[in-house]
Image (cartoon, grey):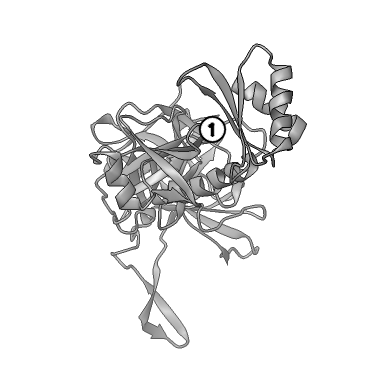
Amino acid sequence: MTSQISEKVIEKFGADMIAGVFFDHTQDFKIVIRTTKKGQKSRDVLKFASENFPELQIEVIPNSPRNFRAIENIINNQAKVLSKKIAGFQSLGYNPATDKLVLSIYDPSAKDASELIEKYKIDKLSGMEVEVQLLSSPIATAALMGGVEMQSIAGRCTAGFGVRGENNQPGVVTAYHCTNNGTEKNYVLQDHEGARHMLTLQTPKPSANHDMAVYLAPVGTALNARYNKHGVQGSEPEFVRSQGKRTDLKIGQSYVCHSGVKTGFSCGTISGVRVTVLSVDKTKKVGDEYLKACNTAQDVCNATFVSFSGPALRCASGDSGGPVINGSIAYGITSGCSAGTVTKDGNPVIYASSLDYLSELPAKLALAP
């Protein structure tokens, strides 16, 4: 009923004049409308609402400091900031009855809401007072999957695939370098339906064979064997039905795609299946060229990467960790992508960490029937 009244009143007077509509059950049952105006304009709102909803008792509270559009903008902008700042961020809304923002957080380690208010300095946002709700469980209902955004204070990456990690706990696999050598303990994953999931880093195990890590969701979080084709309008998430081996891929023949939150969905042809990506060693030089050597602190030293390239291939920072697939077959996750690294044809190259080594994490790929 309140949404119906809001739509009708906003249609008549405009979003600049209305701040909110809510039920008031404190004494007599009535509908309350907050307006940014006072005097005759406020009385016009009361008259219009009373005539269109004669069965309801209507009250108008004038002179609200913000209109509906301003509050909506505050919520949208602050939600983007808070989802990166607060690992357990669940939602941000508005309570017109109190004229306060309502921030919902899931954090099992917090004793009460006041602890979170002090920790994150969130008693006010954009000049508005904040009510903090400490939730006993996550409110996200959509399932974990690959090809969607993962955010942290340090930056963002892309989720590769839904997996089962230690103790069969649900999570996602992404690039190990997204963990910042194991120091980035939390990410917030936002799925294709907008739901947010708090993720915690599973015990990281850097390896000479792969650039992969698992972030776990709370026990009971839904897990879906699908991946999102990021940036492809109108597309539904695709099912993952099998796990392919890098040795199944044929150089110059096999075709794979990747999905990244920065550049979207793009594809290329396999150019290597036993590739090593090494760092430049600036302590060693031959002529004008620096030598390349394996830096065990950051490199995958063994020749286990898969590379692919193509004229339509796109890649950028933020795509790291995203799924590398061919239809319903999962092959790896994006590890290195640089438009500056090109083939002889001048095409970009992407390097993928093979899922052959997923069991080392340990993790098991979620597959659809």
Residue 22 lies, in percent from the top left, at 55, 26
In which quadrant of the rendered image does the N terminus lie? top right
Is residue 18 something that shows in the picture? yes
Tell me the kind of residue under disc 1.
Glu
Instruction: Estimate how packed mark 1 is, as few (under 14), some (14 to 19) or many (20 or more) residues with alpha carbons within 10 Å.
Output: few
Report the side of 291 relative to 360 (left or right).
Answer: right
Q: Is 354 placed above or below 57 here?
A: below
- Residue furthest right as drawn: 12
In which quadrant of the rendered image does the C terminus lie? top left
- Residue furthest front as drawn: 39
Q: Is 145 placed above or below 8 here?
A: below
Residue 317 lies, in percent from the top left, at 51, 58
Nearer to us in this view, 368 or 67:
67
Can you tell which quarter of the image residue 102 is in?
Answer: top left
Which residue is under mark 1? 193
Q: At x 52% / y 36%, what residue is drawn? A: 194
Q: At x 24% / y 41%, what residue is drawn? A: 109
Report the side of 201 relative to 187 (left or right).
Answer: left
Q: At x 29% / y 64%, what residue is drawn? A: 297
Q: At x 42% / y 62%, what residue is drawn? A: 277
Nearer to us in this view, 353 or 151:
151
Can you tell which quarter of the image residue 343 is in?
Answer: bottom right
Residue 254 lies, in percent from the top left, at 57, 44
Nearer to us in this view, 332 or 221:
221
Q: Is 102 placed above or below 24 here?
A: below
